[in-house]
Image (cartoon, helix red, strand yellow):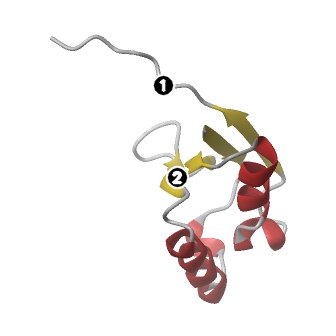
């Protein structure tokens, strides 16, 4: 099944310990078979980050939630608002 994890926070990359940022990206790489897309969210191109979004492949919601909770940014307490939801791709027409 496919899930999305939406992290709402005010963490700015420049303000985070570089070792923690490395651990975060190592975590994404370690789970790239299940965290298939990941990236920061901003309200505009020059605006500060306001969170992140991941697309997760997992068997259950609990498994997807555990992946999100295991992110080093989360375990360090930098992501206080996490939402994990099942996502179903819409059957978009092809021309």
Please tell me how crowded label 2 is: few (under 14), some (14-19), or many (20+) other residues with Cα within 10 Å.
Answer: some
Q: Percent position (x, y) of residue 56?
A: 58, 49
The residue drawn where x is 57% and y is 51% is 49
Mark 1 secondary-structure assignment: loop
Give whichever of discs 1 and 2 has the lower sequence position.
2
Q: Is residue 57 left or right of residue 20?
A: left
**Label 1, label 2: how far apart the Cα atoms are:** 21 Å
Q: Percent position (x, y) of residue 58?
A: 64, 49
Q: Is residue 24 left or right of residue 42?
A: right
Q: Nearer the viewer, residue 26 or 91?
A: 91
Residue at mark 1: 89
Report the quarter where the N terminus lies. top right
With respect to residue 3, does 94 lie above or below?
A: above
Q: Are marks 1 and 2 in contact (CB under 8 Å)?
A: no
Q: Percent position (x, y) of residue 12?
A: 61, 63
Residue at mark 2: 40
Q: Nearer the viewer, residue 64 or 18?
A: 64
């Amino acid at each position: 099944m496919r899930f999305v994890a939406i992290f709402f926070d005010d963490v700015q990359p420049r303000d985070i310990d570089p070792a923690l940022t490395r651990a975060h990206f190592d975590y994404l790489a370690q789970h790239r078979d299940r965290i298939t897309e990941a990236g920061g969210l901003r309200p505009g191109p020059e605006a500060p980050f306001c969170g992140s979004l991941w697309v997760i492949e997992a068997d259950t919601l609990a498994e997807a939630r555990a992946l999100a909770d295991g992110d080093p940014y989360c375990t360090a307490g930098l992501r206080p608002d996490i939402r994990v939801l099942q996502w179903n791709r819409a059957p978009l027409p092809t021309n």
